[in-house]
Image (tube, grey):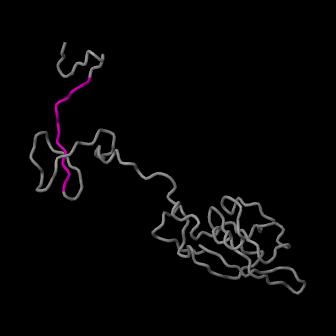
């Protein structure tokens, strides 16, 4: 038995709804998809008829909706190419996993020495780390300042990288500076 508006598939026990076309969709030369009334002529020269996007797809045509969409970590292209942690791995041969703020550090700054990584809090949400090249000491031999080298330290971000990746204009660039041991946000050093 055939019902109006349905195609009967009695052999499979399935009914499929068939609806008359109510609109035509066109891809303009610019790539934009536009909708016109059913059985209409192209809206402009060069427009090509395409399958209309399904409802709820945000207007993405079916041929594009099937394409794999980019997934995963947008920062992946930057890993091991110039972060502060990459520099420490180069200088020391390895580093703890994760962001510097989670590293196991020695918090007794009186025991800091040349050739270690110092961890800073408050520079970014992930923390920051630099390599100690040399120490300054007071007249009693206590450390007071550090001469450090580092990568990816700048207040200016890289405008071509996603902001969440924390890539600065000094990404992959070794810079140096001198900092106070006690007034610069240093939380500890590694290796302990």
Quarter of the figure with residue 135 = bottom right
Locate the N terminus by quadrant. Answer: top left
Q: Which residues are magenta?
A: 16-28
- Residue 176 lies, in percent from the top left, at 65, 82
Is 14 placed above or below 98 here? above
Whether residue 51 sits left or right of residue 101 in the image: it is: left
Residue at 17%, 39% in the rendered image: 23
Per the image, is 108 magenta?
A: no
Q: How many marks?
A: 0
Q: Nearer the viewer, residue 32 or 64?
A: 64
Q: Is residue 85 above or below residue 178?
A: above
Q: Is residue 72 left or right of residue 176?
A: left
Q: Position of residue 168 (x, y in %)?
A: 54, 72
Q: Residue at x 24, y 25 (%)?
A: 17
Say above or below: 23 vs 92. Answer: above
Q: Residue furthest left?
A: 41
**75 left or right, relative to 33:** right
Q: Is 133 placed above or below 85 here?
A: below
Q: Residue furthest top?
A: 1
Q: Quadrant of residue 184?
A: bottom right
Nearest the eye: 51 or 158: 51
Q: Closer to the camera, 165 or 82?
A: 82
- The extreme bottom residue here reads 139
Quadrant (top left, top right, bottom left, bottom right) of the C terminus: bottom right
Magenta span contains residue 22 = yes
**x, y percent for residue 87:** 64, 72
Which of the 4 quarters of the picture holds residue 127? Answer: bottom right
Q: Position of residue 33 (x, y in %)?
A: 23, 50
Describe residue 46's horizontal placement relative to residue 142 as left or right.
Answer: left
- Residue at 79% in and 78% down: 114
């Amino acid at each position: 038995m055939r019902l109006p508006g349905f195609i009967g598939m009695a052999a499979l026990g399935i009914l499929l709804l068939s609806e008359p076309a109510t609109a035509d969709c066109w891809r303009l030369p610019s790539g934009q998809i536009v909708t016109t009334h059913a059985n209409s002529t192209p809206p402009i020269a060069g427009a090509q008829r395409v399958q209309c996007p399904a409802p709820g797809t945000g207007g993405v045509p079916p041929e594009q909706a099937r394409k794999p969409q980019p997934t995963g970590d947008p920062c992946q292209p930057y890993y091991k190419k110039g972060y502060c942690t990459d520099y420490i791995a180069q200088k020391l041969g390895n580093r703890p996993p994760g962001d510097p703020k989670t590293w196991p550090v020695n918090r007794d700054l009186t025991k800091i020495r040349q050739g270690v990584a110092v961890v800073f809090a408050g520079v970014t949400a992930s923390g920051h780390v630099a390599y100690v090249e040399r120490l300054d000491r007071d007249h009693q031999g206590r450390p007071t300042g550090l001469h450090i080298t580092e990568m990816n330290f700048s207040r200016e971000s890289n405008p071509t990288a996603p902001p969440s990746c924390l890539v600065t204009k000094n990404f992959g660039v070794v810079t140096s500076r001198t900092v106070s041991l006690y007034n610069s946000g240093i939380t500890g050093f590694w290796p302990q």
